Amino acid sequence: MSRKKRLFQVVLLTSSAVSLFYVPWPILGAWLPPLPDSVEEQLEASTAGGLDGIVVHADFGDGPPVTAAVGWHDPEEGIPARADALFKIASISKLYVAVAVTKLAAQGGLDLDAKLSTLMPELAGRIEFADRITPRLLVQHRSGIPNFTDVERFWAEPPGSAEGCLELVLDLPADFEPGEDWAYSNTNYLLLGLIMDRVLGHPHFDFIQAAILDRLGLTSTYAGINEINEADVMSGFHVGHPDDLKWESVGMVASAADVARFVRALNDGSLFDGDESAVYAGLYEYEHTGLVPGYQSTVRYHPDLDAVVVQFSTPTNFEGYQWNLASVCYNRVVDILRRERLAN
C-alpha cells in the first residue's frame, strides 16, 4: 500500500471518529428505530427521549380526527397531557396576521404598497428605508428590518410592550435594502399589528376575531393567556430554567384542533371571499412552526393525506436538541398516519 493511500485511510478514519463524537445521539435514537404501531406509541417514545409533553391533532377532510396526548399537561400538579390543552402557538400566529392583512386590504382598509413612513410617520428616520418599506414587504419578511428577538438578552429581559420591543431596533442599520433579500424578522409582524391597530382604530385581534375566528367557529383561540383560565394552558418549560413559563404572556394561545381547522380553511380557500385567496397566494405561507421559551409547535397540510397535522411539545432548548427531536417525532407521526391511510 502506498504512503499516499495509507495517509488517506488514516485521515478518513480520523474524520469518521471525529464525526461520530459529534453525532446528536438522541436524534439518531429517535430517528433510527422502526415506526411504532400507533401515534400514541410514537409520542411515548419521544417523551422517553427528552420531551415532557406532546399533543398531536390530525384533521382529516373525509373522516374523524386523530388526537393523542402523552406526557404532562402540568407536571407539578401531576396532571397528564390533554388533547384539548391550550398552547402558546408563537409564530404560527403570523398566519392569522397575514390573513387579516389580506382581508383588510381587500376591503380597502389597507394599501399593501403604502410606505411605512406614511403609515407610521414617527418611524421616518428611525427605521432605515422606512420610505421604501411596505406592508407587502413586511408580510413577506423582505423589509430588511432587524429582528428584535435577536437583540442580546432579549429573552432574559423582554420588554413589556410592543412599543418596547420596537424600540430595540430603532436607529439600527437595515440588514439589507427592502425587497433585495429575505430574512425572518419578528419585527415585521409586530409592525403589521401596530399598523392594523392604527388603521382600524381598535386592537387588530378584534378584527382577527370577527373575520377569522367567528367565521370558522373557533372558540379555543385567544389573543393571550390573560383572557382564559390558565389551568387550561399546558405547562411549558425551558431547559435550564426552573419555572413553569405558562404565566408569561407572549402572544396567541389556541388548541391544536382550532389551529388545524384554521389551517385547513386557509389551504382549501374557504377562509377567503372574492379575490382574497389570490391576494394571499402572493403574500405568505400556508404552514408554519412556532417557538417561544417553553413552547414549540408545527402545523402543516399534507395533500396526499388530505390532513392538517398539528403538534405541540415542551420543553424547549435554544442550544439543545429538543427542536430536532420534536421535528423527528412530527415526521414519524405523519409517516404512521400515511401508513394507516394506505392500509385502509
Image: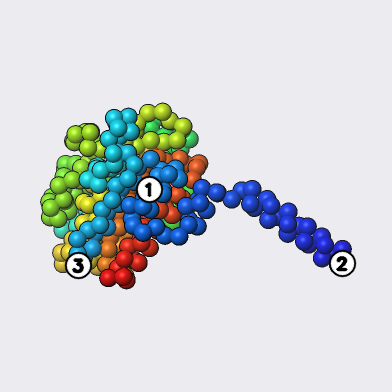
Q: Which of the 4 image quadrants contains residue 15? A: bottom right
In this rendered view, identify the residue nearer to me: 73 or 215. Answer: 73
Q: Is residue 201 above or below residue 277?
A: above
Is residue 269 something one can see in this rendering? no
Q: Are marks 2 and 1 in contact (CB under 8 Å)?
A: no
In this rendered view, identify the residue nearer to me: 343 or 215. Answer: 343
Kind of residue sitting beneath label 1 = Glu
Q: Residue at x 68, y 50 (%)?
A: 18
Q: Earlier in the sequence, mark 1 or mark 3?
A: 1
Give the labeled residue for mark 3. 62
Kind of residue sitting beneath label 3 = Asp
Q: Which of the 4 image quadrants contains residue 63? A: bottom left
Kind of residue sitting beneath label 2 = Ser
Element under disc 2: loop
> 124 left or right of 208?
right
For label 3, the crowd category at 10 Å Cα-Cα, with few meaning under 14, some 14 to 19 and many 20 or more, is few
x%, y% of residue 124? 36, 43
Is residue 38 something one can see in this rendering? yes
In this rendered view, identify the residue nearer to me: 27 or 127. Answer: 27
Q: Earlier in the sequence, mark 2 or mark 1?
A: 2
Q: Residue 44 carries which label?
A: 1
**C-alpha distance separating marks 1 and 3:** 27 Å
Q: Earlier in the sequence, mark 3 or mark 2?
A: 2
Element under disc 3: loop
x%, y% of residue 340? 31, 66
Q: Residue 2 carries which label?
A: 2
